[in-house]
Image (tube, rainbow, N blue to C red):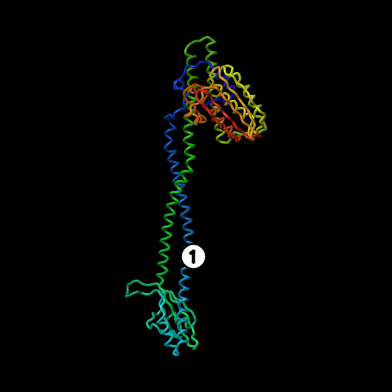
Amino acid sequence: MSDAGASPDRAGAGAVAAPVPPSPSAEAGWTRAAPRAGPWRARTPPARGALRRLRLQLTAWYVGTFALILFVLGSALFATIAHVIAADLDASLHAAARAVAQAAQIREVEAISAKGAAVDAVEELTIPGRSLYLFDSTGTPLMPRGASDPVVATARRAATAGVADHHFEEATGGAGTARRDLQAHAERFTLRSGRRYVAAVVADRVELEDRYATLIAALAGAAVAGLLLVAAGGWFLAGKATEPVERTLAHMRQFMADAAHQLRTPVAVLRSRADVALQRERDPAAYVEALTAVGLEAERIGGIVDDLLTLARADAGERPIVRARVYLDDVALDAVDGVRILAERRGVEVAVPEFEEAAVDADPSLLRQLVVIVLDNAIKFTPTGGRVSLRVRADDGRATLAVEDTGVGIPPDELPHVFDRFYRGGGARAGGDGAGLGLSIARWIAEAHGGTIEIASAVAQGTRVVIRLPRG
């Protein structure tokens, strides 16, 4: 069941149309139109190029946004870690100074000579990565004797103030050689004997710089890996985001080609009818016949245009659905009366062996159009002497309408495409009139009302269409 007219009037008109000389398109079997080369094909590469540029721009935005986030978070993280590491260094210097003072106090308890004991204790004390110094109360170096000037200056300030810190640089060798970045901390302490000393500790800040360098390298590597992953993920997501646009553009191109193909044949017939009628003088009856055929083809074109407009408005969401409480059985019986004349002309019996009262919340005109499309299709593809039956039931909270025919059926490979726009199939179904839009409209109407439409068919045995709608 691949096609139907949009209204019973058009279906009836198509049944009594005068014979028309077949055009090349008609002789080809009215199969689904293949895309034709034309001006619209030349615009395909630019459209794809624009989508590719859009995809690149979206990916660039993803990467740029992530890079900005990394920069802000990284800056904050570096500042925090630098503060923590500097605080740790200060704490370690303070702890080392207290260790020197504690060693001196312990030795004083063990020995009588406070001075010698304190110096010995400092000489025996070792803290990895730290240089330890001991000064007297005036800031004079006791151990080791060769303290540098910045360290001595720091000790003297501590002798006066109690605590002192100093950040300085010191050459590692002769002139022009590398310099070390050092941090000195000095504290004054008093033994139980009352003698005062100054403990000083010096640490090389290269340790801090090494920790910075390691941290920076690790974070930089993680940031680069993250940016690469974001770029790959952004490209993938941008592709997913543009896929609907690509499908829409492809669908629009196919739709335009199919519409042009479907309209070209009746327009060609109109022109040929008019040309034949104007070639020589004819009697009034011949002109009436020609004008009647022209009118029927014009009505056919109008039907196609109306169906295209219906689908276009449906796609754009501009077709309002005015819902009301209606009874599907009443709408079905009214639709049967509308198509009965067409069925009689084709020698097809239309029967309603079963119907139940089934209220639905639907647009009455659209619901009738839905039933008419399905009935019209069934009648068109049922041979003379065949039968079309319609049943309406109400069960499980849904209203069900089933239309069965004893027609030519649909091949299994064509069933997945029967709802495609302009699809007409082949074989025994290719010669039917219509543009292949009826079932597309039927599916839209069913889905717009929260329902479903399903088709089952077997070749030479018939087709069954089932429509299910929520009950009102």
Mark 1, residue position: 80
Instruction: Relative to 452, say whether 182 is above or below.
Output: below
Residue at 46 percent across and 55 percent down: it is 67
Instruction: Relative to 83, say whether 243 is above or below.
Output: above
Q: Amino acid at mark 1?
A: Thr
Quarter-of-image position of residue 452: top right
Give percent across and percent down for residue 395.
Answer: 64, 33
Give percent across and percent down for residue 335.
Answer: 62, 24
In which quadrant will I find the C terminus? top right
Camera-side residue of 432 and 306: 432
115 relative position to 464: left or right: left
Camera-side residue of 154 and 328: 328
Instruction: Relative to 432, say whether 72 is above or below.
Output: below
Quarter-of-image position of residue 11: top right
Q: Could you tell me how many numbered marks the image carries?
A: 1
Q: Residue furthest bottom?
A: 112
Camera-side residue of 451 and 423: 451
Give percent across and percent down for residue 154.
Answer: 44, 79
SS assignment at label 1: helix
Give percent across and percent down for residue 438.
Answer: 55, 27
Quarter-of-image position of residue 284: top right
Instruction: Relative to 356, say whether 210 is above or below.
Output: below
- Using a 10 Å C-alpha cutoff, classify the residue at mark 1 as few (fewer than 14 neighbours), some (14 to 19) or many (20 or more): few
Residue at 43 percent across and 77 percent down: it is 201
